[in-house]
């Protein structure tokens, strides 16, 4: 950190918040609110004279409230930059610090919050995590039992630079506990709070238990656990060392912790799973290992940056295995716990990876993007502004009353805007209406009533169909697939046109909701398909002839099953009935599609068939 | 619960017991044990009970007396714990502290005495020593059919046949663990 601060090409903005991010890869504009420190950084040399005279004491956040700090303070002794800050909420403005500062004149009470705009090429998000407050788990009594503390509190108590100089004392009587119990998975791996495993708690608990045992070899140290997870290099050996030191590992998640009123000791109730019998352990102090949770501001900052959050709240990576440091927004990268709980080596690895990904872009004069972007015909746009909300990447500029414009560098080419535009004023390169329409016509040219027209998204469903083929899963030869980039590109009109041409069945498929490669594309598609289904039913198409399925790339078997089931339904309905339904609804469908001919290129395709709507 | 785990310290000090703390309760030992169903806890639970300092329960259990020293557990233990040796150490501790309750222990005792006497086993004396300890007359009567069968096949000698040099044998036997003068147990 000190090296970073000294680097001529690195500027640290501390005590500041990101307010707004606009622009795109290579050309981001970031508005940052610099909070006033009331100390001029260039003049403050961190001498530490000012807190000595400050009369105000408030709980020290870094010391978990165990020790006080002054109203003029540095957050921690190793803070970078080592510049004091006045906490104006608690300052009584006695100006004793100004006097103490003397000729340096570093203190300036006239500072105001300042907005800074930065032009940057890339962004790395490394906002870390929060520690969950375990007080909702009433059976563990955190917050009501004095001697039940969290790991971070223990870290300050056993740290040599902590407020007790490393003497681990318990809160109730200031005595060193002769027995200590660590409780794992507090609020993690728990469907009531957080379902995921926080990953690094096993290792830090083993570390803390070892530190405690080395300081106080006669103490009884217990670790209550569900599973011990020590998978990385050298970790198992560390665990073995802890066992060898005589730390008692008890397999069993405590059911309840009860305080003994007189002594302040705690009775930990659990089932000792190794013996299959109940166990009560009296411990003088209990340390909980709470879940690592996303930062409080994670969702708001994610919206500012246009990067999605996973269901667990951490930032979603572009691909969990192949691109874990990239985000859905090009030029924005993730490092460390912002993406998910991880330990120091993993955070360092991801941080270096993110930096090198960003460096690749920073070193380039030009950056190539996928050509599959959307384009607005300005003369057709009726300035309704509907497309702006549909874009998962904020790539469309244009509020109501303004011709929409797409920023190609931000567009990922999902095609959601193209399908949602009520004026058919937007098109997508390589996936134009005319091109897809031509495919529909070609695939349904002969005996359409015997065919299943399948619309599949590129990333999941069409890969699922491919998996079905590669894995030799058998299914009837009646399906005809059309690939679009995202299920959001499957236009209502494509489905209507397929039925107008007499298709037996139509399948609309895409990724599972949480797997969508275009953040919200699948959600737009799902809503649209619901409306399409009811419109078709009203027109007289049997509801079983239109099916919506979410099929992942791995689900080749599911693709084969869905097509097999649809083929069976197709046979059960029978060609006669399908033909009759088609006959009856053709005009109604054609009416719905009338305006389509105005879309550039479409008339040409329809004209070739001679039976355009 | 006592803060000092004397029992654990004693086991750690025995030959084979040095590594008991490394046990992570995988269950390979109990899974390998041919007499697990006869035991009250089995080796895995015994290891954990040693960690927890449950001295009385461990030392008064019959488990270490049932151990047939087949060494399957020790061979397969992923932590390299000599479980069979731990069982032997537990037998010694149980004897030393007077915890033994099981008749298996009495049989072991009677057997050791007989072997010390003759340099090899001598069944009639073993029976006499064992039943004198247990005072289980009914049990002795139940052995009669088997005894007759063995006698008929010539498997039950009527007179002991000592090893050639009993004096030298007892010298060897004593340092190996057998006591010069037996105390009643």
Image (tube, coloured by chain):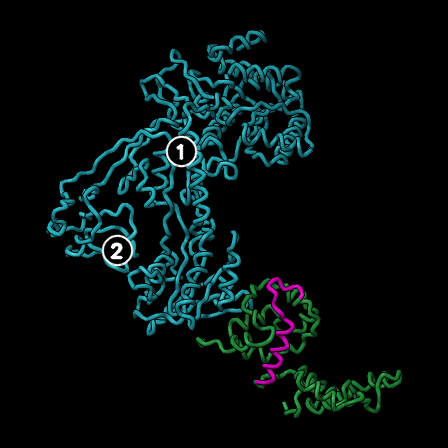
Letter of the chain shown green in the rendering: B
Q: Is residue B92 rendered magenta in the image?
A: yes
Magenta extent: B75-96
Q: Looking at the image, which is closer to me, A550 or A167?
A: A167
Residue A476: image location, x then y, percent: 68, 28
| N-terminal-most mark, 2 or 1 | 2
Within 10 Å of disc 2 (Cα), the crowding (few <14, some 14-19, many 20+) is: some
Above or below, A402 relative to A111 = above
Question: Is disc 1 placed on a helix, strand or loop?
Answer: strand
Q: How many marks?
A: 2
Instruction: Examine the rendering and report whether any part of residue A424 can be seen.
Output: yes
Above or below, A151 relative to A538 = below
Which chain contains the residue that carries disc 2? A
Residue identified by numbered label 2:
A60
Q: Is residue A59 rendered magenta in the image?
A: no
- For image coordinates 28% across by 52% down, the residue present is A76
Within 10 Å of disc 1 (Cα), the crowding (few <14, some 14-19, many 20+) is: many
Which chain contains the residue that carries disc 1? A
Above or below, B148 relative to A59 = below
| Residue A203 appears left or right of A10 | right
Residue identified by numbered label 1:
A332
Instruction: Examine the rendering and report whether any part of residue B137 can be seen.
Output: no
Letter of the chain shown cyan in the rendering: A
Task: Kindly indicate the quadrant of the structure image that contains residue A519.
Answer: top left
Residue A190: image location, x then y, percent: 46, 53
Residue A328: image location, x then y, percent: 44, 32
Residue A441: image location, x then y, percent: 59, 15
């Amino acid at each position: 950190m000190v090296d970073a601060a000294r680097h001529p090409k690195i500027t640290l903005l501390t005590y500041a918040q990101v307010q707004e991010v606009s622009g795109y890869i290579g050309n981001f504009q970031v508005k940052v609110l610099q909070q006033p420190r009331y100390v001029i950084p260039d003049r403050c040399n961190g001498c530490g004279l000012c807190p000595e005279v400050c009369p105000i004491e408030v709980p020290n956040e870094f010391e978990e409230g165990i020790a006080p700090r002054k109203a003029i303070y540095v957050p921690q002794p190793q803070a970078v930059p080592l510049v004091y800050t006045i906490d104006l909420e608690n300052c009584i403005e006695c100006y004793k610090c100004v006097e103490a500062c003397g000729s340096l004149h570093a203190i300036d009470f006239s500072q105001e919050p300042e907005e800074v705009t930065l032009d940057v090429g890339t962004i790395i998000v490394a906002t870390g995590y929060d520690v969950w407050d375990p007080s909702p788990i009433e059976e563990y009594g955190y917050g009501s039992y004095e001697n039940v503390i969290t790991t971070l509190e223990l870290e300050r108590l056993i740290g040599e630079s902590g407020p007790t100089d490393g003497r681990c004392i318990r809160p109730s009587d200031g005595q060193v506990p002769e027995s200590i119990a660590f409780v794992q998975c507090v609020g993690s791996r728990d469907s009531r709070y957080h379902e995921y495993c926080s990953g690094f708690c096993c290792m830090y608990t083993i570390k803390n238990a070892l530190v405690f045992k080395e300081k106080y070899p006669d103490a009884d140290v217990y670790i209550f656990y569900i599973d011990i997870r020590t998978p990385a290099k050298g970790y198992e050996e560390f665990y073995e060392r802890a066992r060898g030191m005589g730390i008692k590992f008890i397999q069993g998640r405590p059911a309840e912790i009860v305080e003994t009123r007189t002594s302040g000791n705690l009775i930990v109730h659990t089932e000792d799973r190794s013996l299959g019998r109940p166990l009560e352990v009296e411990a003088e102090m209990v340390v909980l290992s709470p879940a690592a949770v996303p930062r409080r501001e994670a969702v708001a900052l994610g919206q500012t940056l246009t990067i999605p959050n996973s269901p667990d709240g951490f930032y979603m990576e572009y691909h969990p295995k192949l691109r874990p440091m990239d985000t859905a927004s090009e030029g924005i990268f993730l490092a460390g716990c912002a993406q998910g709980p991880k330990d120091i080596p993993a955070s360092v690895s991801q941080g270096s990876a993110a930096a090198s990904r960003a460096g690749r872009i920073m070193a380039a004069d030009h950056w190539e993007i996928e050509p599959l972007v959307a384009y607005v015909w300005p003369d057709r746009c009726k300035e309704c502004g509907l497309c702006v909300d549909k874009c998962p990447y904020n790539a469309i500029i244009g509020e109501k009353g303004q011709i929409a414009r797409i920023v190609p560098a931000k567009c990922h080419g999902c095609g959601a805007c193209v399908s949602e535009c009520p004026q058919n004023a937007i098109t997508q390169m390589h996936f134009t209406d005319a091109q897809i329409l031509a495919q529909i016509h070609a695939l349904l040219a002969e005996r359409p009533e015997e065919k299943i027209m399948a619309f599949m998204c590129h990333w999941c469903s069409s890969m699922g169909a491919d998996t079905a083929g590669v894995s030799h899963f058998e299914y009837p030869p009646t399906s005809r697939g059309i690939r679009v980039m995202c299920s959001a590109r499957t236009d209502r009109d494509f489905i209507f046109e397929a039925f107008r041409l007499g298709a037996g069945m139509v399948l609309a498929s895409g990724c599972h909701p949480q797997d969508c490669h275009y953040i919200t594309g699948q959600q737009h598609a799902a809503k649209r398909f619901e409306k399409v289904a009811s419109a078709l039913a009203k027109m007289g198409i049997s509801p079983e002839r239109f099916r919506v399925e979410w099929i992942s790339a791995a689900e080749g078997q599911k693709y084969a099953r869905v097509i097999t089931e649809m083929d069976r339904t197709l046979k059960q309905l029978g060609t006669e009935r399908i033909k009759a339904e088609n006959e009856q609804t053709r005009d109604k469908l054609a009416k719905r599609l009338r305006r389509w001919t105005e879309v550039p290129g479409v008339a040409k395709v329809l004209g070739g068939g001679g039976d355009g709507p | 619960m006592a803060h000092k785990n004397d029992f654990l310290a004693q086991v750690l000090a025995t030959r084979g017991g040095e590594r008991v703390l490394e046990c992570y309760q995988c269950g390979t030992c109990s899974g390998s044990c041919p007499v697990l169903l006869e035991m009250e806890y089995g080796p895995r639970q015994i290891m954990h009970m040693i960690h927890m300092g449950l001295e009385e329960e461990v030392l008064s259990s019959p488990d270490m007396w049932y151990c047939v020293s087949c060494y399957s557990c020790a061979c397969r233990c992923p932590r390299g714990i000599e479980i069979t040796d731990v069982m032997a150490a537990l037998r010694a501790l149980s004897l030393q502290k007077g915890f033994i309750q099981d008749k298996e222990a009495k049989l072991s005792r009677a057997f050791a005495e007989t072997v010390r006497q003759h340099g090899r086993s001598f069944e009639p004396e073993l029976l006499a020593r064992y039943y004198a300890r247990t005072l289980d007359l009914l049990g002795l009567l139940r052995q009669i059919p088997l005894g007759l069968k063995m006698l008929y096949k010539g498997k039950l000698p009527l007179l002991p046949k000592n090893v050639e040099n009993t004096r030298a044998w007892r010298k060897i036997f004593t340092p190996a663990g057998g006591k010069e003068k037996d105390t009643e147990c």
